Amino acid sequence: MSEITSNPLDAPGTDPFDVARQAAAQIAEKTGVERHDIALTLGSGWARAAELIGETVATIAATEVVGFGKPALVGHVGTLRSIALPNGKHALVIGARTHYYEGHGVRRVVHSVRTAAATGAQTMILTNGAGGIKEHWKPGTPVLISDHINLTADSPLEGATFIDLTDLYSSRLREIARGIDPSLDEGVYCQFRGPHYETPAEVQMAKSIGGHIVGMSTALEAIAARQAGMEVLGMSLITNLAAGIQKTPLSHAEVIEAGRTAEPVISALLAKIVEAL
């Protein structure tokens, strides 16, 4: 049986929150950490932050935990990592992100967030590599996400579930981040379905409706985090200017290289933000 069909999140009648609770129990057993206080999903360019925020207690393959699959994208490590922070709290670092464009459904996309909440995490930090619409953002620039526009035409909420998304990307947490680096700019993130990059016309559409950042992750995860009662901090690494604003063709290799170049600086920044939370 393939990994796609064997995932319990795909079975009819399954409660995704029950699977998340099972996953959290397995993480507690495998790491020896009963509760995690903060969770981080580290996207392209952000992975080194895991080395800087504290002492690693345990690292486990995400595929050993129910509901998780193998990452499809180069740059994601496929692990779940428990880290003891200097203040005595524990962080869960998620290196196993499922992207919407993989076609596994929204439940799989947000399973890591729901699992983090089930471990006890009250703060969710979501990071990504993305394209920038503001022309003064150079590749390697970290920016705060102030809001999002969900262009996937999908939602992690099922049935008659109504969740307020006002201040979804916590203004309190953004102020803390700016206290670490006052130069941090912010913008509205547009999640497209992917996996193709946006056309120049689509980028102009995003700009006209109030978008500043374009990417293929984060928004659906943030909605699920809010549903789970977590406070959300979102950050994008601008790996390139978006199509039509950047005059050269886009490539995934460019994204990876920009992340690799910026990683030491942005990871140190994120570690300082975590310390201040």
Image: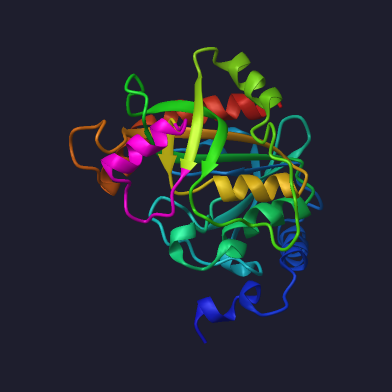
Give the vertical position of 155 relative to 189 (above or below): below
Q: What percent of the width, then of the height, locates residue 39?
A: 67, 44
- Number of numbered labels in the structure image: 0
Name the one closer to the observer, 212 or 111: 212
**Bounds of the magenta segment:** 191-211
Q: Quadrant of the C terminus?
A: top right
Left/right placement of residue 41 relative to residue 239 reads right
Left/right placement of residue 103 relative to residue 248 reads right
Magenta highlight on residue 182: no
The residue sitting at the left extreme is 248
Q: Residue at x 57, y 67 (%)?
A: 63
Give the vertical position of 92 relative to 60 (above or below): above
Residue 260 visible in the snapshot:
no
Left/right placement of residue 117 relative to residue 60 reads right
Name the one closer to the observer, 56 or 109: 109
Give the vertical position of 84 relative to 68 (above or below): above
Find residue 259 and report its image quarter: top left
Magenta highlight on residue 199: yes
Residue 176 visible in the snapshot:
yes
Q: What percent of the width, then of the height, locates residue 263?
A: 42, 33
